[in-house]
Amino acid sequence: MAKATKRENWSGQTGFLLAAIGSAVGLGNIWRFPGVAYENGGGAFLIPYLVALLTAGIPILFLDYALGHRYQGSAPTVFRRLFRGGESLGWFQVAISFVIMCYYGVILAWAASFTYFSINEAWGEDPTAFFTGTYLELAEQPGLSLDVVGHLLLPLLVVWLAVLFVMVLGVQNGLEKANVIFLPLLVILFAILVVRALFLDGAMEGLNALFTPDFSQLTNTDVWLAAYSQIFFSLSIAFGIMITYSSYLRRRSDLTTTGLVAGFANSSFEILAGIGVFATLGFMATASGVGVQDLEGITGPILSFVTFPQIISMMPGGPIFGVLFFGSLVLAGFTSMISIAQVVVAALQEKFELARAAAAALVVGVCGTISILLFATTTGLYTLDTVDKYINEIGIITSAIVMTLVVSWRLRKLPELQAHLNRVSAFQVGAWWRVLLSVVVPVMLLVMVGTTGLSLITDGYEGYPTWYLNLMGWGVVGFAIVFAIVFTLIPGRRGREDHTTFDPESLRDEDDLEEVR
């Protein structure tokens, strides 16, 4: 039987699991989940959140695993092998990762800078003015500026060189070892931070604000949509990461058990982040003589780079707390960043048969340049905010809708993929998985993207000018579509292989064949 070209592999299940968790646990776990939970019913939000995890997050994670593991490739390779014209869907997912990678590096540079600033509380008495004025030199209005903020260049250069270093080293020596080191370190640092936060005056007020359930919110459809959105944005699904990562697993690997552990580990970290963040916010509210509900800036970049510096300046031992918090942001963001980079690097490697070092240098060079010209300028925060909104809430959700509908209804591949999962995994998936992916998930996602899209069209976003939203919002989604079409049409060295010539069974190794016998 013909052997496929040998791919890189994880050293084993543990290495892959740490990498998968490292990818899922990112900036959104720390600065997005606590605020979303608080604004959508507090403790009651955990009910739709858990439902969303079980009915959408885990099923799509299993689908990504099954596709990557069975068809052994990056997203474009997998979808090209799956059906005629499928390569464009894969490149659309690569384009999403490419865009996210460009601005994610800038946020890491901010976090690295603020880790250093925490030592002497460099933001002074007005963290808002420091972050938006002194540090970002933010323009008064959104626009397109080529005025690069000079002091952002050094931390940004360090971030991109670190990403390049890990990418060049490969799957085992780079991605896996980085996660083996950074993920446990992240857990230790954040656990120390949470314990410290719990002993602050007012911590219980913060936790009560977060976890006191408002069950009346469960009848609000927006709360359910928020839960599904949070699961999507935190699990790294439907934009190529888990397809790519699972393709490096050995053929006899337990996919579903690993998926369950990764999914619940990610959610556990989000709840831990909620405890740490709101215990700290409770301290701030108590020290300021106001209620937690009166605080502003409890989610997103403002929470991390304005609200937390305020808290750090108010608390005993603030510099140590600041280093722990911003250091955690750096670690969480970096493990996610390298997983996003791998999507793009692997796709270029396979399409054009590039050496890993060459592909990594090309990707880092292009993304690094864009990150400087678009996101490290005096209008960079506006651009980042807009691009992040549209590429996540329109781009990723659209990718998931197309993927689930094509695989379940057009190709009717779910029984085959279910059999693949059950053949190699201890936890067996049943018909419920096919029903969720073919009916529940597409319906929920169509409602999500429809609601969000209509809101963006009619109400805009954050009061930004319409021309700006069309260019940097809808324009970025359009860029991803054009990117997908162009890279599909570019002839690659493996372009002759498609779903008519590829046989997934040819990828079985001797251990697999022995298992079948």
Image (cartoon, rainbow, N blue to C red):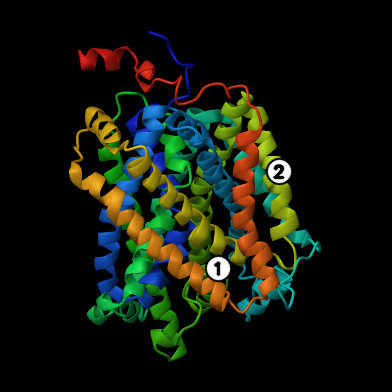
Marks 2/1 in contact by CB < 8 Å: the verdict is no
* 127 or 264: nearer the viewer: 264
Q: Is residue 5 above or below residue 74?
A: above
- Residue extending farthest right: 147
> Could you tell which of marks 2 and 1 lies nearer the N-terminus?
1
- Report the quarter where the N terminus lies: top left
Q: Is residue 117 above or below residue 497?
A: below
Q: Amino acid under label 2?
A: Val
Reading the image, the residue beneath label 1 is: 301
Q: Residue at x 75, y 60 (%)?
A: 151
- Residue extending farthest top: 1
* 46 or 448: nearer the viewer: 448
- Report the quarter where the C terminus lies: top left
Q: Position of residue 266 (x, y in %)?
A: 35, 53
**SS label for mark 1:** helix
Q: Amino acid under label 1?
A: Pro
Q: Position of residue 398 (x, y in %)?
A: 47, 54
**SS label for mark 2:** helix
Q: Is residue 151 left or right of residue 484?
A: right
Q: Alpha-carbon neighbours of circle 1 within 10 Å: few (<14), some, or many (≥20)?
A: some
Q: Is residue 400 left or right of residue 481?
A: left
- Residue at mark 2 to residue at mark 1: CA–CA distance: 25 Å
- Residue extending farthest front: 410
Q: Is residue 382 left or right of residue 457?
A: right
Q: Position of residue 410 (x, y in %)?
A: 37, 41
Q: How many marks?
A: 2
Q: Residue at x 81, y 64 (%)?
A: 147
Reading the image, the residue beneath label 2 is: 366
Quadrant hosting residue 139? bottom right
Q: Alpha-carbon neighbours of circle 2 within 10 Å: few (<14), some, or many (≥20)?
A: few
